[in-house]
Amino acid sequence: MKRILSILVACALLAGTAAVMSSCSGGSKGEINVYNWGDYVADGSEKNNGDYYKDTIAEFEEETGITVNYTTYETNEELYNLLSSSNTAYDVIIPSDYMVEKLKDEGLLQKLDMKKIPNAKDIMDDLKNPVYDKKGEYSVPYSWNVTGLVYNKEKVNYKPDSWTALWDKKLKGQILQFNNNRDAYAIAMQLCGINPEKFTKKDVDKATVKLKEQKPLLKKYVMDQVFAEMEKDQSAIAPYYAGDVYMMTTNNDKLVGVLPKEGSNLFVDAMCIPKNAENVDGAHKFINFMTRADISAANSEYITYASPVKSAKKLLPKELSSSELVYPPESYLKKCYTFRNVDDDTYAYMQEQFIKLMS
Amino acid sequence: MRLKRPSIPYIIWMVVFTMIPIVLILFSAFTDRNGNFTTASFVKAFGYFDVFLKSLWIAFISTLICLILAYPIGYIMSRQKKSVQNTLTMVIMIPMWMNFLLRIYAWVTLLQNGGPIDTMLSFLGIHTTLLGNQGAVILGMVYEYLPFMVLPLYSVMAKIDNGLIEAAEDLGSGRLTVMRKIVFPLSVPGIVSGVTMVFVPSASTFLVAQYLGGVDDIMIGDVIDRIFWSDNNTGSAIALVLMAAILIFLIILNFFGDEEAIA
């Protein structure tokens, strides 16, 4: 009897979960499938000072009546694999610059109807015709930022201003490096005098030598572990996305952020509509909504990357819009480069060399 | 082999989620990006041979430590009163209620410089780096998979009739002889399934080494994960080689298991 009862209880629990899950889907005015980076939209959570961020997705749903099915990915490559090898229909995706170019070149994106996105007029002039989408027909920028350095001033006894600090023998065992092929190689290539926008296998080999030189000095190759490593005083210096560096410096007074004098990677994540989207109209509405100044500012405040919308900058808290890490100055951007699509063979070769480097 | 109707759902499940994926991996491993037949992926796959060996080695050591730790735990548990047995099973299961990644994160916090373990050790005058080496990776694996060793051992040992042990003792066997002649032979099926359940996932695991290891500690699971970013064919080839290695291991293990059980 007891056993039958417990089986019944287990079934009831499962059924309950299923019921909750199914009640989430199915909106009245249609739905759109949005595929974005993890933790990359203001989600209504609490700020450090007790206020709350906006919940931009919920506001969109309320305003338009469209239900948003929101899922996330961790790398551009994950997005690419899902888009190219499955028939899951996404309505809005937010790939980075070089991935926009790759998807566009492979015919996986559709042209946007700019008449349906009037807010896009307010996009910064520099980002209206970016290198990865020269006519600006396939993408509307969502956020942008650069890569930078973060160091702990108690562990580094000078003021580093160059990527070469990541090769400093005095900091042996306390240096971190990107655990991401493209970002790690870009730094090494810059120091080898190669433009990381586009490169050949030979360039990869040269940069590999440079990275091999660095390996004995490193503590670890990291991505989001960098937050714990730096904020808890475990490491001395690390390269990371400048907006995140800003976040780290607000969480630990000993941390300082710098933009390396050589220049760095200017990256843009942009909203696109895949070719096989099902709710194209809803997708346009979503892109237009996310480009509205107050909404873009809310997202920008949450992710601490710069907003591409001109009038959003004024709406941001002063400490964010005046930070060089969140909004790098015009003069610095001149020294920056933006990743371009590299052919599959060279890209796979770089990935292979990077894995071998780590093993 | 006669198929019974209730097994149909399972057969459908297996075909859809096991057989078809394996066929897809096979296909992808033997073709290039354009779908033409080639074995080039396997040549590339063997470029990661050292990572491969290292992963199997780490898995082997972890399995061995798990076995040494779990065997006495399993035995002691199986000799308790029923209610105590249930409580102990519960205690062993509790950590598994938490997500595996969170548990690994917890170890990072425990082991880091200035963390609780490091602080305790430095009070004793021992200054060392605990994180970022192979030892930390093995520790993480042992912690992760220990329950998978304890539970099968315990469930097999719980079935050993106390009468057998008492009979042996009545006939003058010492504790060691009882262990050697009664408990061990009867617990072999538990050892076999415990070793399988620990070795197989730890040989193919990923992320653990990335979190607890240093610059050199990357395992074959991480390589497969990475390579699939840009090259599905080589990724499939490595996965296939790993599957073959694990299959060979299982065949050998089963062979040992059966023989022991017969003897």
Image (spheres, coloured by chain):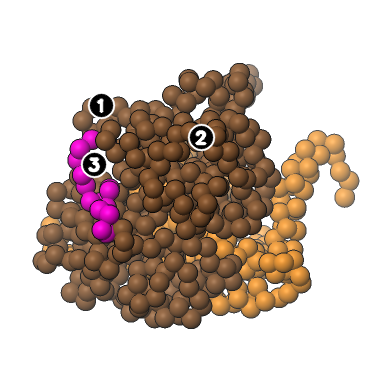
Instruction: Tell me the subunit letter for badge 2.
Output: A
Classed neighbour count for the residue bearing mark 1: other residues with Cα under 10 Å, few (<14), some (14–19), many (≥20): few
Amino acid type shown at disc 3: Leu
Q: Chain A is drawn in which colour?
A: brown
Which residues make up the magenta segment? A316-332
Q: Is residue B221 magenta?
A: no
Q: In this view, does B157 lie to the left or right of A326?
A: right
Give the residue at mark 2. Answer: A117
Give the residue at mark 1. Answer: A51
Q: What element carries label 3?
A: helix
In the image, the chain rendered in orange is: B
Classed neighbour count for the residue bearing mark 3: other residues with Cα under 10 Å, few (<14), some (14–19), many (≥20): many
Q: Nearer the viewer, residue A276 or A231?
A: A276
- Mark 1 and mark 2: Cα distance apart in space: 31 Å
Could you tell which of marks 1 and 2 lies nearer the N-terminus? 1
**Position of residue A230 measured from the top left corner of the image (x, y, whole percent):** 24, 55
Q: Which of marks 2 and 3 is in front?
A: 2
Could you tell which of marks 2 and 3 lies nearer the N-terminus? 2
